[in-house]
Image (spheres, grey):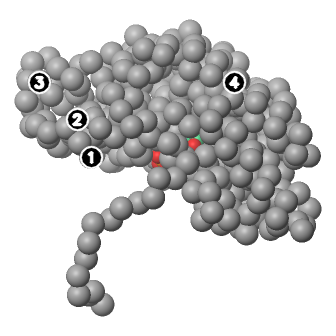
């Protein structure tokens, strides 16, 4: 049914403290509204080169192949699997939350065989189980895992898992969507092979872009494939003609011009803050949030040593209704927090402290809004 008239959409100013998107820095919103220019304009190409450098800094890598895919984090995931997994490849996939399950689905759709290493939701990936799987499957060629499981709030040891993978001649595919800029992630030092991330978590940019980086080992596998990458859009060999062609860039697709201005601005902000300072800020805000939640008698569900500072999974107290509380926070306080996924739906809240959202004002606001709503709700 058509309405008689339509007017512009004006969303309210929310505080985004869920699992993503996070609050977008106003500097980034301003950058998005700058004039659109052509995607082969020399000035735009100069900006793309800066973007690649800034992404290398953010990933802590010298990898030549470092670029933002023109689609959300899920497309970065798909790009890694589509390029690296050939039909018949055996891939060990660590499943300790929702995103591991998606990795498995990607392997199958690429014609690979997924060997699953299961860990309980809310825990880190257990390196001993991974080693057992590597030992039992000497013909496996890739190990895939999620560094920061946003569905549960657990952080896994990307360096240790990659070391193991290399001992057994496997490459790694690492999901760093939520870890990038929120906790230490050192692609070169830890020798991670293919890594994808997203713009809407700790980079505090708008959703819709996925930075990826591939080292030479990973690119060698891509270049030596027997079969074509089954996705035309995500085929790195084609995409690099646009992102990498020295002075002779070939049209591949029209880059999302303004979103890339936004990412450039987000990375400039991060660069001037400094990556280590960003990691420290996420940790410090997490400590304050945790202390406040504990004063209210609330508990975090992930064991302390495996907790992500930027995603806090809080156990919903007995007798408290998840959606009532979240709806009141949204309608009365313009505050968004997340609910649990899968089995933890209705049992956990997921409070994000990502990027621009990780500041003391937000922590105080969230604690007092939650306390007020819980007091009212339990009376
Ligand atoms: C958010 C997220 C994704 C997917 O990113 P989208 O931008 O939503 O496509 C993948 N993996 C993890 C760990 C995430 O948190």
Count residues near mark 2 (Cα–Cα under 10 Å), then give few for <14, some for 14-19, many for 20+. Answer: some
Per the image, label 3 sits on a secondary structure element best described as helix
> Comparing marks 4 and 1, which lies closer to the viewer?
4
Q: Is residue 312 above or below residue 63?
A: below
Q: Nearer the viewer, residue 371 or 218?
A: 371
Question: Mark 4 = which residue?
Answer: 283
Mark 1–mark 3 distance (CA, rounded to whole Å): 27 Å
- Residue 208 visible (yes or no): yes
Mark 4–mark 1 distance (CA, rounded to whole Å): 40 Å
Q: Is residue 258 above or below residue 347?
A: above
Q: Nearer the viewer, residue 91 or 33?
A: 33
Question: Mark 1 = which residue?
Answer: 232
Q: Is residue 197 above or below residue 113?
A: above
Earlier sequence position, callout 2 versus callout 4: 2
Question: In the rendered view of the protein, which quadrant contains the C terminus?
Answer: bottom right
Question: Mark 3 = which residue?
Answer: 43
Per the image, label 2 sits on a secondary structure element best described as helix
Write the residue at 69% across / 57% down: 339
Count residues near mark 4 (Cα–Cα under 10 Å), then give few for <14, some for 14-19, many for 20+. Answer: some
Percent x, y for residue 372?
78, 56
Per the image, label 1 sits on a secondary structure element best described as loop
């Amino acid at each position: 049914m058509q309405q008689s008239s339509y007017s512009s959409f004006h969303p309210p100013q929310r505080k985004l403290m869920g699992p993503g998107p996070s609050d977008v820095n106003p500097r980034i919103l301003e950058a998005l509204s700058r004039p659109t220019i052509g995607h082969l304009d020399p000035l735009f190409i100069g900006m793309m080169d800066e973007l690649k450098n800034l992404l290398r800094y953010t990933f802590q890598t010298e990898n030549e192949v470092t670029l933002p895919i023109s689609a959300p984090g899920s497309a970065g995931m798909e790009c890694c699997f589509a390029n690296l997994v050939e039909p018949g490849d055996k891939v060990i996939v660590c499943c300790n939350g929702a995103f591991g399950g998606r990795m498995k689905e990607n392997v199958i759709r690429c014609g690979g065989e997924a060997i699953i290493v299961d860990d309980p939701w809310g825990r880190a990936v257990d390196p001993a189980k991974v080693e057992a799987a590597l030992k039992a499957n000497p013909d496996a060629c890739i190990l895939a895992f999620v560094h920061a499981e946003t569905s549960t709030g657990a952080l896994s040891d990307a360096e240790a898992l990659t070391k193991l993978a290399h001992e057994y001649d496997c490459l790694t595919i690492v999901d760093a969507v939520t870890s990038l800029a929120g906790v230490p992630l050192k692609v070169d030092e830890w020798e991670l092979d293919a890594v994808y991330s997203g713009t809407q978590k700790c980079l505090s940019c708008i959703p819709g872009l996925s930075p990826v980086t591939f080292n030479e080992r990973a690119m060698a596998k891509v270049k030596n494939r027997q079969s074509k990458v089954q996705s035309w859009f995500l085929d790195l060999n084609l995409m690099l003609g646009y992102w990498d062609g020295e002075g002779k860039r070939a049209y591949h697709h029209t880059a999302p011009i303004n979103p890339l201005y936004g990412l450039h601005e987000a990375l400039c902000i991060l660069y001037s803050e400094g990556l280590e300072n960003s990691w420290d800020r996420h940790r410090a805000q997490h400590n304050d949030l945790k202390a406040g939640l504990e004063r209210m008698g609330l508990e975090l569900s992930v064991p302390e040593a495996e907790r992500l500072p930027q995603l806090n999974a809080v156990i919903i107290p007995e007798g408290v209704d998840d959606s009532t509380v979240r709806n009141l926070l949204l309608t009365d306080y313009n505050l968004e927090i997340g609910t649990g996924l899968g089995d933890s739906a209705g049992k956990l809240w997921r409070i994000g402290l990502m990027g621009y959202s990780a500041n003391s004002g937000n922590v105080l606001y969230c604690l007092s809004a939650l306390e007020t709503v819980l007091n009212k709700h339990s009376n």
